[in-house]
Amino acid sequence: MTAVRSESTELSASSASLRFPPGFVWGAATAAYQIEGAAAEDGRTPSIWDTFSHTPGRVRNGDTGDIAADHYHRFRDDVALMADLGLGAYRFSVSWSRVQPTGRGPAVQRGLDFYRRLTDELLDKGITPVATLYHWDLPQDLEDVGGWTVRDTTERFAEYAEIVAGALGDRVPYWTTLNEPWCSAYLGYGSGVHAPGRTEPESALKAVHHLNLAHGRAIGVLRSVLPATAQTSITLNLHQIRPLTESAADLDAARRIDAVGNRVFLGPILGDGYPADLLDDTAHLVDWESLVKDGDLAEISRPIDLLGLNYYTPTLVSDGRVQTEGPAAPRNDGHGASDFSPWPGSEHVAFHLPPGETTAMRWAVDATGLRDLIQRISREHPGLPLMVTENGAAYDDYISPEGQVNDPERIAYLHGHLSAVHQAVSAGADVRGYFLWSLMDNFEWAYGYSKRFGAIYVDFGTQRRIPKQSAHWYASVARANVLQDLPEEDGKS
């Protein structure tokens, strides 16, 4: 497969306003461990992220999610803020270890009750609940017996999915099995920068297959429990990959990263199986023939109603074995510093920071990547409805002397990426909605509380919430279903 290239380096000039399709869903997203806190309340036991964050040196400043944004106790106030902002939908994740502390056996009803209350509060305010079953917080008890490297975890996940769907299925119309299994597998078991912090390429690839299988098994369970009108999905952080040059070596580097980063999920989930080139690239690391059992691919490819896409920045690669000048560059793949690669079988590929503006994460700002990614999926899988389930940016936000949080850079970022979504829709892509990441500042995984992605500013010392300028701007777009051109001063960084 040839690398996917950007059709242009800039989005074409927009008109004064861009109207989105009728019924387009406007929302914001969060994850349980990042905002809930209450880490040991009402029966909840440690997840792998509790263990990881409490391990010295794993998270910046020694931060943990023990309290986070205290959403567990403040969810009604947070839902009221969503209503004030006019959000149509809220994408949240369920904490597995809050519902099923050991990953086995009956549910803890107090844990389920929290999600029942949250769902009811959302519906009472006219906000559509969108549930994600897994956003990286595997119960530690399951990791202790192998985690995602063993098949039994897929069985445990299916049981957990049945519990949650049984409790919330009559009220939640949208269901996502997994959020970004790429991160769970490769950052958790490959580079070790995410929980559980293992650095084993073979284990990372085993985790990929078992996450794919867990998704398929959960889809089967959801279909048996949920109403026929429920929409099922998985959310993938697909990479918009661009080769540094048109050389054969760089094009092959892009092919490799597309295989291990994108097609390893898209292939089996959408019915095409694991790509042959991926199997060849990684044959020295894992025995795929013994890993993939009879019936696995059929189970993984159970039909879904939607595909969720998470996008933040493009990926620029070259063949690192071709050294042009100077010392070898660090791996600028945007996924944390580690001596171990999260790209099994492609450790020689070099990653580059694209030129131009960056966010506080040092991620390049390039909305064409989102447009090109949507168009690629629409072209390769016609008729598959899509949702942008995460998109946003971290900046160095602060409270002004007037008590406001002004973030024109984030507004410009969002405007550019919403324009990109509209371009893709205008070209024929079936995009059903857009979820801003994130509703509020939170525990940003290995970065702790040092990075702020939220539309709502959180003072973690007092838990005070302050909607940022971008929150009010996004609310106006969501209410009107129309993207207006930015005044010139708002687009300046």
Image (cartoon, grey):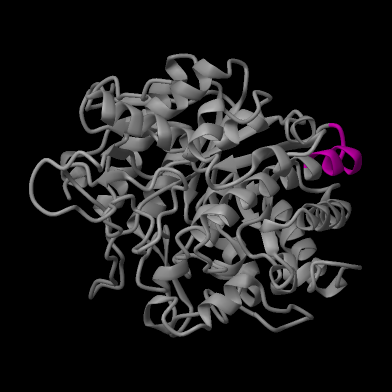
Counting labels gives 0
Name above or below for residue 344 compared with residue 48.
above
- Determine whether, in the image, residue 423 is placed left or right of residue 16: right
Based on the picture, tell me whether residue 225 belongs to the magenta stretch: yes
Q: Which residue is drawn at 22% across and 27% down?
A: 9
Based on the picture, tell me whether residue 329 belongs to the magenta stretch: no
Whether residue 128 appears in this view of the structure is: no
* Quarter residue 46 falls in: bottom right
Report the residue that reaches farthest toward the front: 284
- The one of 297 and 180 positioned closer to us in this rendering: 297
Q: Which residue is drawn at 22% across and 33% down?
A: 244
The residues colored magenta run: 219-228
- The one of 354 and 256 positioned closer to us in this rendering: 256
* Quarter residue 38 falls in: bottom right
- Determine whether, in the image, residue 338 is placed left or right of residue 160: left
- Determine whether, in the image, residue 408 is placed left or right of residue 306: left
| Residue 377, image x, y percentages | 51, 24
* Quarter residue 258 falls in: top left
| Residue 80, image x, y percentages | 59, 62
- The one of 23 and 361 positioned closer to us in this rendering: 361
Q: What's the magenta bit mostly, secondary-structure-wise?
A: helix
Q: Residue at x 31, y 47 (%)?
A: 411
Quarter of the picture holding the N terminus = top left
Whether residue 481 appears in this view of the structure is: yes
Name above or below for residue 273 compared with residue 77.
above
| Residue 330, image x, y percentages | 24, 56
| Residue 456, image x, y percentages | 43, 62
